[in-house]
Image (cartoon, rainbow, N blue to C red):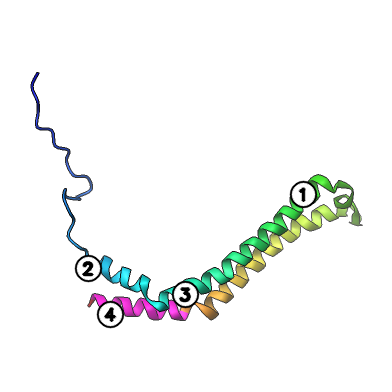
Amino acid sequence: MTTSSYRPTPTLGVPFGDPEPDPAAEIYLRAQASPEFQEIRRRYRDFVFPMSLAFLAWYLLYVFASTFARHFMAHRLLGTFNVALAFGLLQFASTFAITWAYARNARAKRDRAALNLRWETQEMFR
C-alpha cells in the first residue's frame, strides 16, 4: 500500500494558512464598532421590531378570526362585501402603510447618518 502526499487545493483563491489581515475588513470592523453605526442600528431596531410584531399580531388576528369567528367574518357590510373581505383588503392596505412608514422613518432618522458614516468609511480607504 502506498501513501500519496494528497494535499487539497485551495478553493476560490484562498491560500492555506493564516490569511493576512485585510485592511478593508479592519476599516469595516471599526465602522461597525463606532457609536454612529450603533445608533443607526438602534434606530432601525426601534422601528422594525415593534412594527413587525404589530403586523404579525394583525395578521394572526385575521387568521384566527377566519378560523374561529366565522359568524363574525361572514357578517355582511355592503351587499356581498363582508367583514372577511374587508379584513383581507385591510391586510394589503396595512402592508402599503407599513412600507410608507418605513421609508419615511428611514429618511428622517437613518439615511443621513448612514450616508455620513459611508463617507467617513470611504475616506479611510484613501
Pointer 4 local density, CA inside 10 Å: few below 14, some 14–19, many at least 20 = few
Q: What residue is shown at x 43% (from left), y 76% (from top)?
A: 114
Amino acid at the residue labelled 2:
Pro
**Spatial separation of the CA atoms under disc 2 and disc 1:** 53 Å
Q: Which residue is mark 1?
A: 64
Camera-near label (2 vs 4) is: 2
Q: What residue is shown at x 31% (from left), y 72% (from top)?
A: 30
**Spatial separation of the CA atoms under disc 3 and disc 2:** 23 Å
State the mark number for residue 123.
Answer: 4
Amino acid at the residue labelled 1:
Phe
Q: Quadrant of the C terminus?
A: bottom left
Secondary structure category for the residue under label 2: helix
Camera-near label (3 vs 4) is: 3
Q: Residue furthest top?
A: 1
**Apparent side of residue 2 relative to residue 53 in the rendered image (left or right):** left
Q: Main secondary structure of the magenta part?
A: helix
Q: Earlier in the sequence, mark 3 or mark 2?
A: 2
Horizontal and vertical percent for residue 87?
78, 57
**Spatial separation of the CA atoms under disc 4 and disc 1:** 53 Å
State the mark number for residue 40.
Answer: 3
